[in-house]
Amino acid sequence: MAKRRRVKRGPDQNASADNDSDPLKQPEMQASSPFRHNESRLSVDPLSIAAGLLSAMVVYVAYYPADSVSVERGEALWLACLSIVTTTICLAFGFSPAKWRRCSISDKVLLVAPWCLAGWMMFAALQVSPTGNLRLATNEAWLWVTAASMFTSARILFQSLALRRALTTVVIVCSFGLAVHGLHQSFVSLPANRADYERDPEWVLELAGVEAPEGSSERMVFENRLFDGGPTATFALANSLAAALLVGVIAAVAILLWQFRELFYSAHWVGVVLLLITCVVSLMAARSRSATLAMLIGILVLVAAVALKGRSKRVLWMGLSLTALLAIGVLGSLAAFGNREWFEQAPASLAFRFQYWRSTWNLALDYPLYGAGPGNFQSLYERYREAAAHEQIAEPHNLFFESLASGGFVGLILLIVNLMTGIIQPVRSRNRNTEVEAEFTDRSAWVWLGAILSLVMVWLLGIARLELPDVYANAWILPLSLGLGWVLSRVTRDMSSRAIDSMWIAITAAIGVHLLAAGGWTVPGVAIALWIGGGLITRLSEDVQIDRNERFVLSFPVIVVTSGVVLAASLYLFSIRPVEQCKRLMASAANTRQPLQRRNLLEQAVEADRWSPDAALWNADWYRWSLILEGDSPAKRQRWTALLRSVKERAGEDPAIYRIVSAQQLHVYQRFGNQDDLNAATDTVEWAVSWSPSNQWLMAQLAEIYRERNDPEAAGRYSRRAWELSRLGGNIERLLSRQQIYRAERLGEQVEFGPVRVPAADILPQPN
């Protein structure tokens, strides 16, 4: 295959070079590019398959973005497997030792440093046991491997301009589809859900799988999110959706800036304007302050990049005017029609962030080498949560602090090395200043094939699992997205390499700004734009094609393929297989009505995944109800106790799991009044309190337990502390009137329908 040909400009080519500096004049130059003649060629080769897989993963995470908690539960493991396969193909067939020798220092750093970061996170995950949950840790560690894999694949594949255009279009269309979904939720789904909740709140809570007794803080949190929260589309949080919408907003602005003249004389501008309006309106509906600020900053970065590279005052003023109009429109709409709390609560929201970051910093000072480890921040954070902070967060809401918490200072340093190298990487003129590229095999068709097959697979899997995506929303999403995809494929095929680079620089900058104050760094649906965009911007300077004279180096692809197989096999054997088997057995147990069969399935699930506490907790719950309903039995009690011990060992020092265990122990005590059950509950809650000293529920529950144990001094001490904590921060969710605690006394058969819980304020005396 031909190697990259250098383009030498002669004196007669200066005019063409000058035209290239003006983005409004580029399309004429592009029409004569010899690369355009290769865009119709289609060939099947390993790198084509890799391009299709990368596109398929983009569409897949649009439907299944997996929040950080889902990642810890193993929802992103198959994504990790596909990314490893993709990278193995790219390195084996698109790289060589000779290419390594030709790479610049920054190229080499960006080839090695991401894998060092991923390797360190995996090493940190294996070090958290027994204080941490090994299953959660390794599940999240694989996401860091996914990040390194997709970033490396993008750097190798994105040297083809046609491929950059095609995959950029796919990413934009996915952002548009999420925007349409968000608007459908805002105007259709959420109003219907709110009406259903007002008619029958218990049915809605059961449907959502939320246990929240009337008057409890859990119910208040659910109601706040239902009535005051914005749309989330396929994400768990509106902030995560907002990050994905930034792609569509900035891409639309970039197209308008770079392709203004061509759009002016065609009907394609309607699709681009529709993209911009839909994404902006959906972004405003999400009510994300950090994303709104990031949108404006990203557009300014885009305008600066266009103006600096194009040296066009007209583009500069047009971009600044568009930014100003957009800012005035957004802020004016929010002021006129938005919720006043959006503005009024901004200082309080920022103050909460500072609380998270201070606590995370203190955590890192105590655990400087590994931090909490991947997947275990939520449990370890409770030890350092400030007393006035009421939220029990799953992540620090900052990409740097999240990396610090997951991998200690080593992980943070490695992240900074990656980011700084990507920012200061030398840009080779032959890779940016001309549209004349090597005769790449066109793989853009494989991008579309991968996206379509992934879309079909999503729906087939939904049918097989009886978990279809939102059918009513997709009745709007699919036709609109497919239509926009057709329009954008016509628009982006004329975009220059500079235009696409500028677009992605602005997108990654905007999402990065957003993630400085929001979660999403370990959410695949959010982070995939950073992985792909970073790989596109820092793509390798050399041609991906391998010279035939280098093919004698057969050991390199063999080593790469062997390493990829070993890595994928390790992922499957130690993570995918046990997690999937455990989930399948637990789902079967939930769907069967035969008690003995359910117990057997749960016992198999406990053995299927020896790192996860979930199956053991479910199995212990089965024995708990068996004891409550069928009477005390030494054999059942022994097995129940052993399962609870196994839960504690697997969960590590997690106060949330210990709280659930104590609930089982107190329920059994309410039924039989056995002192051993009360003693066991006392130990469990005391350990939880030591790991979560700012939790008012735990303090109140421990006060009630010591009242039953006839220890008024300890009961009074914990009761006073519970009242103090409930009044800190001025948050009504912490009030003891909303903390439903278990009565620590023998109640007999009346608890056969469920444990007896009462508001803590009703039984704990108020301090003088």
Image (spheres, rainbow, N blue to C red):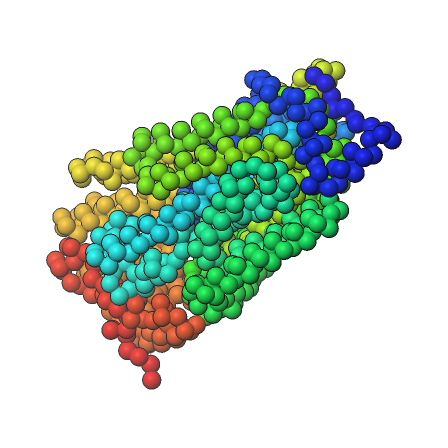
Residue at far bottom of view: 768
Indicate the quadrant where residue 445 lies.
top right
**Horizontal arrangement in the rendering, residue 247 relative to residue 27 (left or right):** left
Residue 309 figure quarter: top right
Q: Position of residue 304 (x, y in %)?
A: 69, 51
Residue 42 image position (x, y, % from top left) = 58, 19
Pinpoint residue 323: horizontal percent, then vertical percent.
Answer: 60, 55
| Quarter the N terminus occupies | top right
Whether residue 201 is situated above or below residue 638 in the rendered picture:
below
User: Does any portion of residue 177 appear in the rendered image?
Assistant: yes
Q: Is residue 398 above or below residue 124?
A: below
Relative to 507, 609 lies left or right:
left
Residue 294 visible to an observer of this rendering: no
Q: Nearer the viewer, residue 678 or 237?
A: 237
Q: Residue at x 51, y 59 (%)?
A: 330
Q: In the rendered view, tell whether residue 499 sits above or below residue 5.
A: below
User: Residue at 74% across / 37% down in the picture?
Assistant: 20
Expressed as whole percent of the image width and height from the top left, the position of residue 563 reads 58, 27
Q: 682 or 18: nearer the eye?
A: 18
